[in-house]
Image (cartoon, helix red, strand yellow):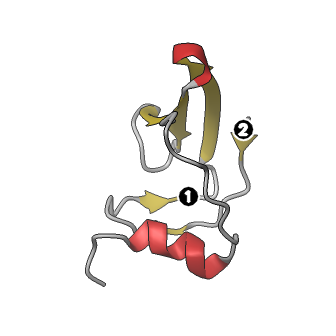
Amino acid sequence: METSNFTAVIWGLYTGIDSSNLKRLRERYYLSNGGMQLNVEITIIDPVYLTKPVTLTHQWKKRSDTKIIKAPCSMEQAQSYTTAGYDE
């Protein structure tokens, strides 16, 4: 999946990297470990602020002994993830 049409703005998260309106994100999600792990590769492309694309990876492991908790999706909930552990 590719995301574009970003607004030029200071990113504002822990990276402190500015973001131009030319920025694009390429995301690839896939399962591994018999479906017990979700993996993501995110490539950030921004020719204004980055000299080359940057790829980040992350994994989430499912625990077979834990039930999935359904939580409401809201801007307030989402913001708690972007600011978790950082002083504003």
Between residue 70 and residue 87, name the one nearer to us: 70
Residue 46 percent across, percent down from the top left:
53, 44
Q: Residues within 10 Å of mark 2 (few under 14, many from 20)?
A: few
Residue 12 seen from this side: no
Residue 41 seen from this side: yes
Taking the spot 47% from the left edge, 32% from the top edge, the residue there is 53
Which residue ends up furthest to the front in the rendered image?
A: 65
Q: Is residue 53 left or right of residue 88?
A: right
Between residue 20 and residue 35, name the one nearer to us: 35
Q: Is residue 26 left or right of residue 17?
A: right
Dot 2 or dot 1, earlier in sequence: 2
Q: Quadrant of the N terminus?
A: top right
Residue 20 percent across, percent down from the top left:
55, 58
Instruction: Point out the frontmost of discs 2 and 1.
Output: 2
Look at label 1 and name its amino acid: Ser
Which residue bears the numbered disc 2? 2
Q: Is residue 53 left or right of residue 86?
A: right
- Marks 2 and 1, Cα distance to the nearest angstrom? 16 Å
Taking the spot 71% from the left edge, 49% from the top edge, the residue there is 4
Q: Is residue 13 above or below residue 31?
A: below
Is disc 2 placed on a helix, strand or loop? Answer: strand
Q: Is residue 36 left or right of residue 71?
A: left
Q: Is residue 18 above or below residue 3?
A: below
Callouts 2 and 1 close, C-beta under 8 Å: no
Between residue 41 and residue 15, name the one nearer to us: 41
Taking the spot 63% from the left edge, 35% from the top edge, the residue there is 26
In the image, which disc is placed on residue 60?
A: none
Q: Is residue 52 above or below residue 76?
A: above
Which residue bears the numbered disc 1? 20
Residue 62 percent across, percent down from the top left:
51, 35
